[in-house]
Image (cartoon, rainbow, N blue to C red):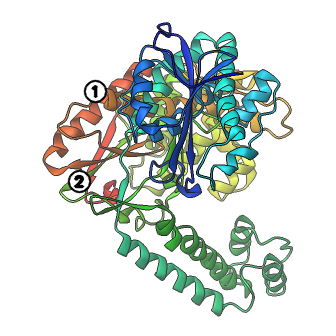
């Protein structure tokens, strides 16, 4: 390894240069934010042997200018670009290669770890020690060992890129070029979500108080599975051996008049409030709150590709897990900035529409093209009953549809519908008989043994050594869920690329099939139409055989969605 002090100015156009950044003293809880730590160094590798190191933050802008015509290679580019933007303007560029995201595109499902050390072992047969990395948390100066560590990271990133280029397929490149890279630049410009701290803390106190009251009212420790099982088994819950929620729910229904039933309900209610008080309590604020011009803001860490299907993920904190089905109270805390409104765009029936397009099922295509509600029509097809959207039977159709297309067993469906396995099996048979195109799709996918792909070609590798039927389920749901993820990413990336308003890109988050933005009041109507157009154009280009609709909502908070 040859370490040089200055980057040459005559690097060939389109040459690959690996860039790595080290920061002293970063806060472990906010590594995704440019708010802590002090610049340590930037290393640039131009070959398997040559690497340049720069330790003066005032030279970052100049160094990056010298590299403008090169292809930047980074491992987890989101981190490096986020930090480097403290000292230099870095606009979106096509000449970018992220070894982390590209590895996930190529090998999602085949491997489950994608750190730089993992890729070093995988491609270079080298162990990349990470002990020195921990030193950067506490030290403020570079020594010979830290210099060598930082330079080795850049060298290995360059070498991994060279190895990836040899195995990358055209379809892998298409996903990177058309989906994940554009989405990455959009994510880098996400604005945080404003939050009503006082309301959040009030909810946290209420949840804690309610949990404490329920705990005190119970004659056993609700956090002790052993005590829960012992107490409830003596009061009518025959055969109870575990205190898991699904087991208690079954026993509550089986023994509605037992002495144990109200106690089990109280225990489950306690667990819910205790979970909310813990996960969405005071530490949520203390760990993640920042301020932007006096406005309290939460900035989550959005990952462009994380799940097996290629969908996005969120952490620190995870806003995708904020309760929404049984209560909107938490979403009400995420509010618009002063003088702004929250906008939510939401694909209607996104996954059923994708299923119709992929399977080309004649009946599904007929339903969607007619504009009728798919679940109401399913009730007619399966039960012979005409219902409207207010009918409880419509709700029961959703798990049948999802169960059939995602490989749910008759036992799993029976649990969701609260019926016996024979009834669930009958419903699945009725569904597949009526929707023969979906049945053919399911059979076709179940024959796949290597990998399956989304509509755009994103691979999801199947684990042939899995003794459960998880691989079989992935063969069914990965193309559908993955296509939904690709569609949503392309939608907000298109918004980002075509954004031409007199204020910065306003998207603040992606919650599965929802795109959430925080927009000045005067522009709400215009931005609503713009976002809806982008989302529909992307969807129709991907699935031209079915018509898509996008629900658009706006209001004072994230709870504006109906």
Q: Nearer the viewer, residue 224 or 238?
A: 224
Give me the disc on residue 513: none
Residue situated furthest top in the rendering:
12
Give me the disc on residue 498: 1
Q: Residues within 10 Å of mark 2 (few under 14, many from 20)?
A: many
Can residue 543 be seen?
Answer: no
Q: Which residue is mark 2?
A: 341
Q: Is residue 268 above or below residue 287?
A: below
Q: Is residue 197 above or below residue 541?
A: below
Q: Residues within 10 Å of mark 1 (few under 14, many from 20)?
A: few
* Disc 2 secondary structure class: strand
Q: Is residue 297 above or below residue 177?
A: below
Is 464 situated left or right of 358 in this image? right
Q: Are marks 2 and 1 in contact (CB under 8 Å)?
A: no
Image spot of residue 231 (x, y percent): 81, 86
User: Which residue is located at x 38 percent, y 51 percent?
Assistant: 192
> Residue 126: which quarter of the image?
top right
> Residue 562: which quarter of the image?
bottom left
Q: Earlier in the sequence, mark 2 or mark 1?
A: 2
User: Which residue is located at x 34 percent, y 68 percent?
Assistant: 196
Q: Nearer the viewer, residue 385 or 188?
A: 188
User: Which residue is located at x 37 percent, y 65 percent?
Assistant: 333
* Disc 1 secondary structure class: helix
Image spot of residue 165 (x, y percent): 64, 13
Image spot of residue 257 (x, y percent): 69, 84
Is 114 situated left or right of 534 in this image? right
Is 469 situated left or right of 42 in this image? right
Q: Is residue 79 above or below residue 394?
A: above
Residue situated furthest left in the rendering:
522
Image spot of residue 473 (x, y percent): 71, 36
Is 506 situated left or right of 44 in this image? left
């Amino acid at each position: 390894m040859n370490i040089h002090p200055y980057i040459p100015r005559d690097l060939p156009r389109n040459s690959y240069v690996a860039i790595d950044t080290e920061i002293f003293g970063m806060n472990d809880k906010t590594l995704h934010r440019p708010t802590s730590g002090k610049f340590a160094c930037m290393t640039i590798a131009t070959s398997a042997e040559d690497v340049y190191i720069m330790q003066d933050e005032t030279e970052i802008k100049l160094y990056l200018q010298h590299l403008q015509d090169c292809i930047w290679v980074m491992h987890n580019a989101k981190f490096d670009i986020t930090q480097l933007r403290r000292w230099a303007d870095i606009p979106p560029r096509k000449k970018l290669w992220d070894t982390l995201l590209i590895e996930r595109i190529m090998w999602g499902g085949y491997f489950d770890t994608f750190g730089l050390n993992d890729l070093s072992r995988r491609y270079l047969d080298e162990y990349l020690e990470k002990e020195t990395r921990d030193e950067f948390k506490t030290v403020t100066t570079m020594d010979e060992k830290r210099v060598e560590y930082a330079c080795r990271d850049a060298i290995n990133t360059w070498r991994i890129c060279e190895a990836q280029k040899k195995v990358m397929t055209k379809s892998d490149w298409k996903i990177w070029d058309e989906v994940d890279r554009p989405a990455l630049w959009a994510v880098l410009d996400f604005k945080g979500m404003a939050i009503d701290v006082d309301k959040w803390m009030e909810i946290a106190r209420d949840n804690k108080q309610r949990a404490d009251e329920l705990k005190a009212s119970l004659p056993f420790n609700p956090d002790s599975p052993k005590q829960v099982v012992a107490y409830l088994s003596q009061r009518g819950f025959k055969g109870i051996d575990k205190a898991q929620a699904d087991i208690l729910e079954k026993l509550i229904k089986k023994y509605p008049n037992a002495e144990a039933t109200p106690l089990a309900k109280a225990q489950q209610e306690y667990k819910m409030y205790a979970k909310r008080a813990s996960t969405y309590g005071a530490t949520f604020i203390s760990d993640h709150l920042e301020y932007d011009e006096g406005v309290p803001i939460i900035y989550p860490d959005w990952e462009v590709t994380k799940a097996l299907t290629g969908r996005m993920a969120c952490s620190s904190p995870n806003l995708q897990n904020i309760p929404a089905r049984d209560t909107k109270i938490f979403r009400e805390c995420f509010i618009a900035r002063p003088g702004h409104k929250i906008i939510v765009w939401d694909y209607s029936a996104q996954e059923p529409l994708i299923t119709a397009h992929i399977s080309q099922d004649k009946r599904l295509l007929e339903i969607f093209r007619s504009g009728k509600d798919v679940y109401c029509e399913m009730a007619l097809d399966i039960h012979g009953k005409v219902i409207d959207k207010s009918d409880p039977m419509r709700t029961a159709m959703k798990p049948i549809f999802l169960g059939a297309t995602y490989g749910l067993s008759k036992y799993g469906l029976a649990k969701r519908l609260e019926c016996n396995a024979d009834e669930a099996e009958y419903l699945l048979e009725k569904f597949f008989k009526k929707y023969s195109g979906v049945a053919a799709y399911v059979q076709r996918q179940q024959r796949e043994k290597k990998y399956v792909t989304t509509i755009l070609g994103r691979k999801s590798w199947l684990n042939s050594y899995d003794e459960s039927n998880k691989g079989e389920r992935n063969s069914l749901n990965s193309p559908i869920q993955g296509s939904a993820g690709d569609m949503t990413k392309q939608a907000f990336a298109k918004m980002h690329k075509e954004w031409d308003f007199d204020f910065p890109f306003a998207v603040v988050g992606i919650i599965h099939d929802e795109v959430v933005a925080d927009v000045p009041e005067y522009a709400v109507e215009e931005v609503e139409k713009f976002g809806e157009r982008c989302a529909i154009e992307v969807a129709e280009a991907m699935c031209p055989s079915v018509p898509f609709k996008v629900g658009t909502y706006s209001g004072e908070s994230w709870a504006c969605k109906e």
